[in-house]
Amino acid sequence: MVNEMKTLDMYLNEQLQDDAFRQEWEENQPEMDIIRAMADARIAQNLTQKELAERTGIDQADISKLENGTRNPSLKLLKRLADGMGMDLKLVFTPKKNGHLPTAQ
């Protein structure tokens, strides 16, 4: 039997074909990038959510909510998490991929 389970990337690529989905995805991309960077950094440090919670004084449940996207972190909270992982927090502004500047509305 051939495994027909879709990977997340395959599923996402299919969904991105829908214009409404793609627009919503692009609008939420900055938040998703923060969530992914936070989780990737924790995993790279070989820390569990519980261990990071102990280091930062942030409840493990709150870290879980941050990582699954049901809670938005403040910069202050991101700084505490970075400190708990022995890392610096860096915010970078980059040009948009389409190169268009917004117009006043």
Image (cartoon, rainbow, N blue to C red):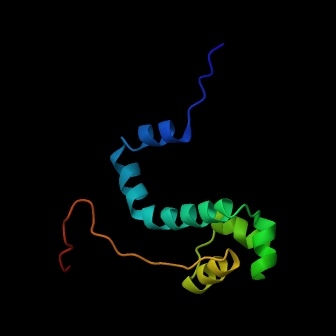
**Residue appearing at x 41%, y 57% in the figure:** 24
Q: Is residue 20 shown left or right of residue 56?
A: left
Task: Tell me: 68 left or right of 18.
Answer: right
Closest to the observer, 50 or 72? 50
| Quadrant position of the N terminus in the picture | top right
What residue do we see at 45% from left, 78% from top? Answer: 91
- Quarter of image, res 27: bottom left
Q: Position of residue 103 (x, y in %)?
A: 17, 76
Instruction: Identify which residue is drawn at 35% across, 75% down.
Output: 93
Q: Nearer the viewer, residue 2 or 38?
A: 38
- Is 33 situated above or below 21? below
- Residue at position x 49%, y 63% from top? 33
Count of numbered labels shown in the rendering: 0
Q: Is residue 58 visible?
A: no
* Residue farthest bottom in this picture: 76
The quadrant in which residue 67 appears is: bottom right
In the displayed structure image, the side of residue 25 where residue 61 appears, left or right: right
Q: Is residue 2 left or right of residue 29?
A: right
What is the x, y in percent for residue 55?
A: 78, 78
Does 80 appear above or below 5?
A: below
**On screen, residue 99 above or below 23:** below
Residue 37 in the image, given as x and y percentages of width and height: 55, 64
- Quarter of the picture containing the C terminus is bottom left
